[in-house]
Image (tube, rainbow, N blue to C red):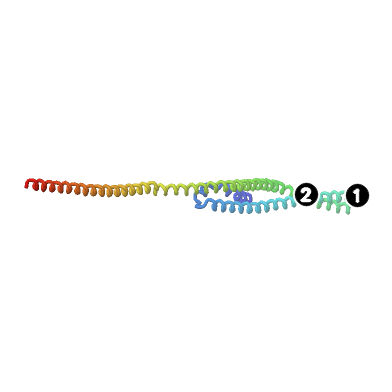
Amino acid sequence: MTEKQTILGRISQLTRANINAMLDRAEDPQKMLDQLIRDYTNSIVEAESAIAQTIGNVRLAEQDHAADVAAAQDWANKAVAASRRADALRAEGNTADADKFDNLAKVALSKQIGFEQEAKDAEPIIASQNETVEKLKSGLANMKDKLQDLKRRRDTLVARAKSAEAQSKVQDAVGSINVLDPTSEVARFEEKVRREEARVAGQAELAASTLDAQFEELEDHSVDVEVEARLAALKSGNA
């Protein structure tokens, strides 16, 4: 696996995660989201470090390429200088020294060609690495955007979770009220009072009827006394 694939894989790993599924398994959504944000932030830090290293390597390659180009130009200048010196010596009839400088010019040209080839070979590699760097920068920016979105979603989801928890508590309270309905207790107490009132009324009615019976008995006794008295009077008159 290439370094590019490794870094891009690290960047895209969490962006492909199914956050909703993770939240479904979480007992405490707030703790889960906070941990997810910490993990995501750490991944961004790791990605930044890896990307910085990659950029540093590309810049070193560019410096080496610039040095190869500069060296090629330097050897080209040396070749020109040696060739001109050989031409001047040859014009003076100094063939031996002229050949020596021509040979120096050839050495310089050979060096020039070598550095030019190194610079040419490095160019597509550097171009590819720069393309990779741009993709990595884009991926990192995407990660940071997603982190901000995750933080915003975290606040919203935590608020929703707390609201749902509060509603659940209210529903539990309402459910317990329904199970222990106070109106039924009041109804039973009312029935108890009514029964007590009826009992007291019954006692009063019973007491009243007993008193009436006593008066009736007294009246009956008075009648009997009068009858006896009249009977005695009659007997007394006849005598």
176 relative position to 143: left or right: left
Please provide percent x and percent y for residue 29. 53, 50
Which one is closest to the eye, mark 2 or mark 1? 2
Say what amino acid the circle numbered 2 marks: Val
Q: Residues within 10 Å of mark 2 (few under 14, many from 20)?
A: some
Q: Which mark is residue 88?
A: 1
197 relative position to 229: left or right: right
Count of numbered circles in the view: 2
191 relative position to 215: left or right: right
Q: Earlier in the sequence, mark 2 or mark 1?
A: 2
- Give the residue at mark 2: 69
Decide if residue 166 is in sight here: yes
Say what amino acid the circle numbered 1 marks: Ala
Please provide percent x and percent y for residue 123. 72, 47
116 relative position to 182: left or right: right
Q: Residues within 10 Å of mark 1 (few under 14, many from 20)?
A: some
Distance of mark 2 from mark 1, alpha carbons?
29 Å
Please provide percent x and percent y for residue 204. 28, 48
Decide if residue 18 is in sight here: no
Q: Secondary structure at mark 2?
A: helix
Please provide percent x and percent y for residue 26. 51, 51
Residue at the extreme left of the image, as rendered = 239
Residue in view at x 40 percent, y 48 percent: 182
- Between 165 and 5, the residue placed more toward the observer is 165
- Between 100 and 72, the residue placed more toward the observer is 72
Q: Which mark is residue 40?
A: none
- Between 29 and 111, the residue placed more toward the observer is 29
Circle 2/circle 1 CB separation < 8 Å = no
Q: Secondary structure at mark 1?
A: helix
